[in-house]
Structure formats: C-alpha cells, structure tokens
Amino acid sequence: MSLQQILLGLLREPGTGYDLKSVFDERISHFWSAEFGQIYPTLNRLEERGLLESRVEPSEKGPNRRVYSLTRDGRKELLRWLGSGPAMGAERFAYLAQLYFMDALGDVHETRAFMTALKQRLTEWLGRLQAIEAAVATGHGAAPEYYSDGGFHRFATLRMGILSVGSKVAWCDETLAAIDRRIALPAGVGAATERRSGRGAGPSAPDGSDHEPCSATPHGEVAS
Amino acid sequence: MSLQQILLGLLREPGTGYDLKSVFDERISHFWSAEFGQIYPTLNRLEERGLLESRVEPSEKGPNRRVYSLTRDGRKELLRWLGSGPAMGAERFAYLAQLYFMDALGDVHETRAFMTALKQRLTEWLGRLQAIEAAVATGHGAAPEYYSDGGFHRFATLRMGILSVGSKVAWCDETLAAIDRRIALPAGVGAATERRSGRGAGPSAPDGSDHEPCSATPHGEVAS
DNA sequence: TGTTACTATATCAATATTGATATACCGTTT
DNA sequence: AAACGGTATATCAATATTGATATAGTAACA
C-alpha cells in the first residue's frame, strides 16, 4: 500500500533492488519490511509510471547492477505523500490473535509458556533497538544514518520503536503476573483450569477483575 | 498469513462470512482486520481443505446464509497453530515511514503539524479501547465477549492494545517537545530549518542529543 | 580443474489484500 | 406499483506479499 512511496523515499539516493532489500532488513525493519519478490515488481511499476528511472552499470562483484533513481515526478509524488497526513493502516499482531483464542487449549500453563516465549522475543527485539540508540547517543557511529540531514526524523522513528516494544514487554509482565494469580487460586474454585469462580454470566466481576485492577503495571502509567 | 487460522478461531461458533466481517470490525480490530474480498475466498479454501464445513440456511432478512463451522480437522489445525509458539510477523507503520522521510519537506513546522494530527488519531483510538475496558471493569455489558469462557485471554489482548497505543501517544508528546525545542533555537544556529548546530558530521553530539536525553518522557519509564 | 560456497541480482507461482461492484431481500416513499 | 434506501450477502479485478527458485560472478578449496 505504501511500499511504492517508501521506495521513492529510499531512492532519494540511487540504488539497486538488492541495495534496497538490505536497507529494509538493516535499517527500517522496525516499521516496514519487504522481500525481493515485491521490491522488483514495484520498481518496475514505478519506472513505468515515470516516477523512477534506471540505468545498468557493471558491478565489481556479481552481475550487472540496475541502479534506480528518482525522477522529478517521483520526487513530487513523494512530497505529495508526505504532505497528505498520517497514513493510519490497521495494525496486525498474529501473536495477539493466538492469545485471543488460547482458551481453546484449556490450560493456563500453556498460556503462561506462550507469554514467556513472547516476552523473550520482544525483549531481544527491544535490546537491538536500544543498542542502536546507545550507539547514537555515545556517538559510536554504528548507525551512520542518524548523523546526516534527516537524523532527527529518523531518530524519532527509532524512539517510537523503543517505546512501543517496551510497552509490550511491560504488558507481558502484567499479563504473566495475572496468570500467576490465576494459577495460585485454589484448584476447586472454578470448574476446570479455564473456568471462572462460579458467578456464571453475571457481570458483577468479570474475568478482568483479577487482571486489571491489581495488575503489576496499572495502565495509567503509560496510557494518558 | 494467519487469516486462515484466525477464521478457524472465530468459527468456534458458526457464522457466515458477513458475520465474521463484523467481528473483525467491532471486536478484534486492535490486532487484525479483513475485508469481504479476502474472507470469502479464504473460507472457500478452508472448506476445500476440509477444515470447515458449511450449510445454507434461509435468512430472516436478506439472501440465504451460508453458515460455516469448524470440522474436527479444523479444530486440530487451530490447536496446532495455538501450540506452535508466538507468530512474530514484522510490524508495519506507514506513518513512521512518512516521518522517516519527512526531512525532505525541509520545514520542521510540517513535521509538527504531522505529529499533532497523528497524536489526535492515536488518542481517539486509545479512547475507544479505554471505553471498552471501562465497560468491562464496571460490568456494563457493552462488551459481552469478555464475560464468557476465554474472557481472560481476550481481556489481555485488549490490555496490550491500550498499553501499546498509549505508549505511542506518549511518544508523540516526547517528539512534539523535541520539535518545539528545535523550533525555539535561534534561527541562525544551523544552515536552514533542517540544519544542525554546525558541529558537522562529528559524532560527539548527534541529532538525538536534543531529543532523547532531555525528552519529555525518558524511555526508562516504559522500556525496561 | 572441478566443487563448493558465498555474495549479488532477479524472477516466478502461490497466496493475501484492497477497493469496487454485484445481488437479494425488505421497508418506505411517491 | 415504481422508485428509493438500507441491510445482508457475495464476487471480481487489481495490487501486494511471501517463499522458493534461478542466474552471475568471484573466491577458496580439494
């Protein structure tokens, strides 16, 4: 949906499809990614539309390079997109979908294992982002893209990655604590491992009641 | 990618493609969405694979309903997916991509307007999620899906939405504060509106230096 | 010199996704 | 009863995306 414009943005300095792939993987994976299979067809379409132009160059290593660069129209389209207001696509989290249905497994311990694994993945991810931030802060130039024009904007996107992934790690802790409280309940209170305390469908004290009000991380801390 | 499994999960209670569309729109939009155009072909494929079965029923209003329900194999596939560990797809934020390239506009005030608009969108979104949470907490059953079996898991996904969107609102504040500090700089310090304070490419005090260290929301609050 | 391996480059088939459009039935208005 | 509008239901064409595979050169190695 926005890949076309993103390619235009990245091609403010010319490069091949292969170059672009490594930018996705190494620099901007915290907000977008793309495979070869979509990069090349999209470059073709952009060139047909006159937003990009390309020339073939011999390469030092490997086959010839087809180097793409922005045309005047391409730059115009990029600026139009930048000026068109925030593009709010829906967010997708497959792991939340798994959690949403996980009562089907009928065992809180499965959920606990899931959340533990998830927390670890997210923590590793957060660590990678924080390492980049630290490199920028101490000026050890492992992150050259933050030191030229536009560094402010790029740093801001990094910060959002850190805050956002950080909030997810905090959410894992909150949820793990709630799970542990459920596990600690005397085994006979509900029907089975997944049953509630017998109040039936009455709304007076829903599931969330042992989750949110005494949670490890009350939502006021982050939200509002 | 996970739509097939998500449909299986939703079809633990039978329904039509139309029903499913409203579940996406009204209940789980904080982690997944889908259009008719992908729901129906996916249902077909799942039925071909034997994971779903369907029967046609007369409808009270409108054309006949094709009601899908889970087969034994479908339930098996759902459980397999739930047990396969967290599915960590890459996250995509088109608005971050816009911000990343926004130095091309050459005017901090454009960035400020962008961030203000973004903050408003995110704040509205957060409000909707918090309204659901409040309804669950006070037991005013505007959110029946949280009061039956599985309510704990569903509430946890809601909490992640709240924490995650909340952290993004906080990030907007942090970034707006940093922008305002840049705007307040004496106009001649850098070259143009987008130039830095003249230390050139030296790494001693990169862009982030007037962004992170004295930011409105130090990242330690959320991350770690 | 043939083999393996690795980087750089690109294409293809299958699937996913979006946005627009089509079709069926019902209730209300003209 | 003809037209309009709304809800429920579904399909289609265009585009996006994934994952696997292909192709070219270079380098090391057996």
Image (tube, coloured by chain):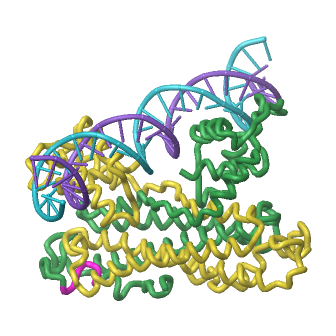
Chain colours: A green, B yellow, C cyan, D purple
- Relative to A17, B25 lies left or right: left
Q: Is residue B210 highlighted in magenta?
A: no
- Relative to A212, C13 lies left or right: right
Rendered position, A37 above or below A27: above
Q: Position of residue A184 (x, y in %)?
A: 28, 80
Q: Position of residue A68 (x, y in %)?
A: 75, 40
Q: Residue B224: in sight, yes or no?
A: no
The stretch in magenta equals: A204-209
Q: Residue A83: in sight, yes or no?
A: yes
Rendered position, A44 above or below C3: below
Identify the residue shown where x is 34% and y is 87%. A213
Identify the residue shown where x is 82% and y is 67%. A140
Q: Is residue A207 highlighted in magenta?
A: yes
Rendered position, A218 above or below A85: below
Query: How many tags in the picture?
Result: 0
Q: Position of residue A133 (x, y in %)?
A: 70, 70
**Foreground pick, B88 / B41:** B41
Identify the residue shown where x is 14% and y is 77%. A201
**Foreground pick, A168 / B176:** B176
Identify the residue shown where x is 55% and y is 67%. A123
- Relative to B66, B177 lies left or right: right
- Relative to C14, B217 lies left or right: right
Q: Position of residue D26 (x, y in %)?
A: 82, 29
